[in-house]
Image (tube, helix red, strand yellow):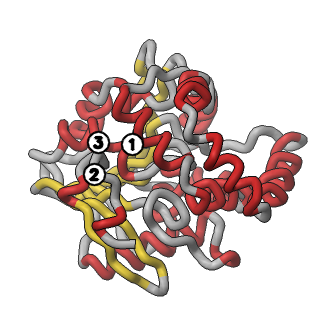
Amino acid sequence: MNLRDLPKFWPNSEYSRFIKVDDIDWHVQIRGTGPALLMIHGTGASTHSWAALADKLANQFTLVMPDLPGQGFSSPLPPEDVCIEGYARGLQSLLSALEIDPKLLVGHSAGAVIATHLALHQQFSPAAIVSLNGAFLPFGSAAAPVFNRLAQWLSKSRLLAYITAAHGMFNRPIRNMLVETGSSPSAQMLQCYRELISRPDHVTGTLKMMAGWDLADQRQVLPSLRTPLHLVVCSNDRTVSPWQSERLSEFVTCSKLYRVPDLGHLGHEEDPTPFADIIRAALPAKI
């Protein structure tokens, strides 16, 4: 991949670059000035998810917005590394190559899980983590193994990826899928998700991420987190129930819970203002 491969309409493409680190070709956008802020998107998304929020934050932060491996325009991880630890380790290598030490981590959905793993296990200490509708807990002891096995099976089918990609050419199913998260997508976001789901590599990478998503170990170590954790939930989230973060706030002592009314799972794409305010307030004044 290179800059010529990016769609002309892609948000913030003027800040895009490609960098190869440990056999992974990363697509990353770096924009703004100030303390470094690493933004980690959720499953099935890409840098485009941060477009509206980036407009709000670029005057206060240096925003580092990568596509996770196998999604968006980044190449995949080796199969044995497709797990929470593997994504975190890959991001650590990317940050080292860029010589960036983020002072703040922001993660959406599964990206919030990766952010906490970075703070718990990697070699830097951010001042705070902001979780936007974080997907920290399994679906349940009975459902989670079934879900993971199904995703593992689906992720091996390139035929499924091509069928799904072909289906992505139609506007209405994609809109319905996004609306089912509890959010109302803008025309720009709809165009971006349509582009992503039309790409078999992105579909395969998303399924593989889902297949390798084992939260059991993460659940055990989260109470030891000492980095301030700001848990933001949206009342209309139909993808990750707000009770996940509400429950997490009870056993992570350094956490704080925020409730944003009306918005859904993609709330930061719908209306970035309340999320930008929380992110700004999360960074200690001394930094």
Q: Return the disc, 2 or 1, that comes first in the chain's sequence.
A: 2
- Pick the residue in front: 14 or 116: 14
Residue occupying the point 18% across, 57% down: 14
Question: Where does the image place residue 2, in percent across and percent down from the top left?
Answer: 33, 72
Pick the quarter of the image with the C terminus. Answer: bottom left
Please name the residue that numbered disc 2 is placed on. Answer: 8
In the displayed structure, 196 sits above or below 262; it is below
Please name the residue that numbered disc 3 is placed on. Answer: 51
- Pick the residue in front: 185 or 64: 185
SS for dot 2:
loop
Question: How many tags in the picture?
Answer: 3
Q: Amino acid at mark 3?
A: Ala
- Pick the residue in front: 49 or 285: 49
Is there any visible trace of residue 287 in the rendered image? Answer: no
Is there any visible trace of residue 259 in the rendered image? Answer: yes
Query: Which is closer to the viewer, label 2 or label 1?
Result: 2
